[in-house]
Image (cartoon, helix red, strand yellow):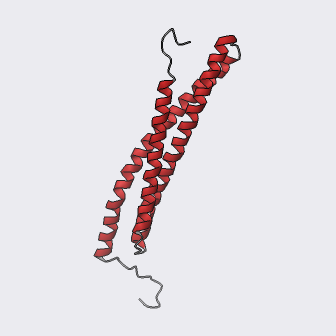
Amino acid sequence: MRGGSLLLLKVPPVERIADIAHTIELAIAPVFLLTGVSSILGVLSNRLGRIIDRARLLEDRLLHATGSDAQLMHDELDILKRRARLVYRAIALGTTCALLVCIVIATLFGAALFDMTITKVIAAFFIAGMVAMIGALMIFLREVFFATASLRIGPDHR
């Protein structure tokens, strides 16, 4: 109706709906990736929490420690500090990866919605996200190696 108070809604053609459906299919893989990244972030957060809890316990015990016990506690606190820094960096890179994957998903939909061809931009964000995840996993592995190397088990751990 021209000039009338009713607005006519334009129904998208079948091809447009197919394009959006295809975009949703493309976005599913990054969504699964996002689920994996969030699982890794959960593991890293738990590790950081355990490191912080152990450091707080040692700091409380250090108030009453003397001599070699105090030195052992200082040494362990130094190790925990290094481990916490590594886990923090891995969390930062993992979070960066998650953000980049979200940008990939949003860009996919934006490109489909506005009929834009920006495949290189989407690829660049995805590659950057994967580089961030590789970095996070490498740092995580380094922290695990460091934690294992500094492990003291048994009565002869002094």
Query: Which quadrant would the N terminus be assigned to in this image?
Result: bottom left
Residue 80 in the image: state x and y as whole percent: 58, 28
Q: Position of residue 66 (x, y in %)?
A: 70, 12
Considering the image in quadrants, where does the C terminus appear? top right
The residue under the point 46% across, 88% down is 4
Can the viewer see residue 43? no
Residue 22: quarter of image = bottom left
Question: Where residue 134 sits in the image (x, y, percent)?
Answer: 44, 46
Q: Is residue 35 left or right of residue 91?
A: left
Residue 140 seen from this side? yes
At x 62%, y 22%, the residue is 75
Total number of numbered labels?
Answer: 0
Q: Is residue 105 above or below residue 145?
A: below
Locate residue 128, reporting x and y percent: 46, 56
Picture quadrant of residue 69: top right
User: Of 80 and 23, which appears nearest the observer?
Assistant: 80
Measuring 69% from the left and 11% from the top, which residue is drawn there? 67
Q: Looking at the picture, tell me which residue is in the foreground, 150 or 24.
A: 150
